């Protein structure tokens, strides 16, 4: 169990969408989702097990890398 306290996780997620009329009864919705948009890395806690080879080392990240997702939706 890691007993160290760290900063809270702050991550900027962005959603952009635009609706387009295709015909009178058909509408298209284009959407882009950016998770962790600026791609900031938040480091994990250092290892606290004195018997481990990774004692005092930071070996990972808490947040996810940047993900970009595109969506196209047709409504009729």
Image (spheres, helix red, strand yellow):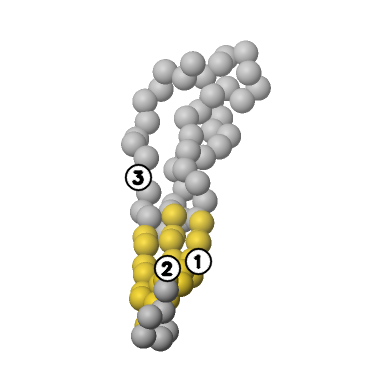
Q: CA distance from mark 2 to mark 1?
A: 6 Å
**Percent x, y of residue 46:** 50, 28
Helix, strand or loop at disc 2? strand
The label shown at residue 5 is: none
Q: Which residue is mark 2?
A: 31
State the CA–CA distance, disc 1 to disc 3: 23 Å
Residue at numbered disc 1: 70
Of mark 2 and mark 1, the one earlier in the sequence is 2
Q: Quadrant of residue 27?
A: bottom left
Please identify, in this view, whether the residue under mark 2 or under mark 3 is nearer the observer: 2
Mark 2–mark 1 CB contact (< 8 Å): yes
The secondary structure type at the circle numbered 3 is: loop
Are there few (<14), some (14-19), or many (20+) residues within 10 Å of tag 3?
few
User: To which quarter of the image does residue 75 belong?
Assistant: bottom left
Q: Secondary structure at mark 1?
A: strand
Q: What residue is shown at x 56% (from left), y 30% (from top)?
A: 57
- Residue 16 placement, left or right of 71: left
Front-lying residue, 72 or 51: 72
Q: Which residue is mark 3?
A: 10
**Residue 13, above or below 26:** above
Q: Residue at x 44, y 66 (%)?
A: 32
- Front residue (pair 29, 32): 29
Where does residue 30 sit, x and y in percent of width and height? 43, 72
CA gap, disc 2 to disc 3?
A: 23 Å
Query: Where is residue 21 shown, x and y percent of the image?
Result: 37, 83
Quadrant of the rendering where the C terminus is positioned? bottom left
Residue at 46% from the left image edge and 72% from the top image edge: 74
Tag 3 or tag 1, which sits nearer the N-term?
3
């Amino acid at each position: 169990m890691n007993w160290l306290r760290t900063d809270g996780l702050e991550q900027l997620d962005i959603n952009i969408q635009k609706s387009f009329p295709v015909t009178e009864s058909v509408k298209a919705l284009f959407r882009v989702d950016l998770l962790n948009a600026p791609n900031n890395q938040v480091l994990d806690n250092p290892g606290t097990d004195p018997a481990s080879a990774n004692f005092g080392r930071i070996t990972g990240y808490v947040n996810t890398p940047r993900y970009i997702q595109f969506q196209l939706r047709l409504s009729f």
